[in-house]
Amino acid sequence: MAIPEKGFLLIRGALLADPSRRRGEPTDVLIQDGVIQSMGTGLTAPEGTPVFDATGLLMHPGLINAHTHGHTGLAKGMGDKWTLELLLAAAPWIGGNRTTEDKKLTTLICAAEMVAKGCTAAYDLYYEFPLPTRDGLDAAAAA
């Protein structure tokens, strides 16, 4: 279920990670217009509010990937057994000669993988070969 941009959503009974207790406690979360309004147990919401039953599901803050490479999305698995030296030597033919649309797509693939795994923020160490271009960086940013 997607979080609606407008209106309310009530997430009911999710196990909220609490580091101070070292366990998850069932918690309700009321969201309005994409922003958390309140958290607790037995929350009520306006009539007609969609309710997502999260009983038994773990809820935690979004993860942060502080070192990713958006330009590698189309090359996953190509050099998974290579040493770092071989990977760096092969980088020009793995990531070179891409169109602006390719650059956007490869970054979008990486972003989709991160979101699917719970990442909500990333520091992308994007590069282009042989030199960075404004169009290439704009394409990656648009993803």
Image (cartoon, rainbow, N blue to C red):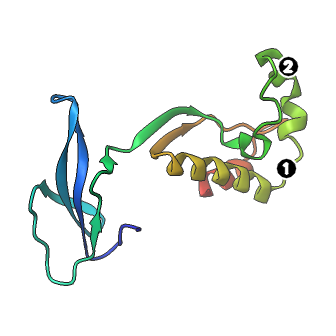
How crowded pointer 2 is (Cα within 10 Å; few <14, some 14-19, many 20+) is rated as: few
Real-space CA distance between mark 2 and mark 1, rounded to the nearest whole angstrom: 21 Å
How crowded pointer 1 is (Cα within 10 Å; few <14, some 14-19, many 20+) is rated as: some
- Residue underneath mark 2: 86
Which residue is at 88% across, 27% downward? 90
Image position, residue 133 (x, y; %)? 75, 45
Q: Is residue 81 left or right of residue 107?
A: right
Which residue is at 75% across, 51% downward? 103
Image position, residue 6 (x, y; %)? 31, 76
Which residue is at 83% across, 30% downward? 91
The amino acid type, in three-letter code, at marker 1 is Arg
Q: Is residue 2 above or below residue 129?
A: below
Quarter of the image where the C terminus is located? bottom right
Q: Is residue 123 above or below residue 45?
A: above
| Near-viewer residue (124 or 63) | 63
Are the two marked residues, 2 and 1, in contact with CB atoms closer than 8 angstroms? no
Q: Quadrant of residue 82?
A: top right
- Residue underneath mark 1: 98
Image position, residue 121 (x, y; %)? 46, 44
Whichever of callouts 2 and 1 sits on the residue coming sooner in the sequence is: 2
| Near-viewer residue (141 or 105) | 105
| Near-viewer residue (58 or 48) | 58
The amino acid type, in three-letter code, at marker 2 is Leu
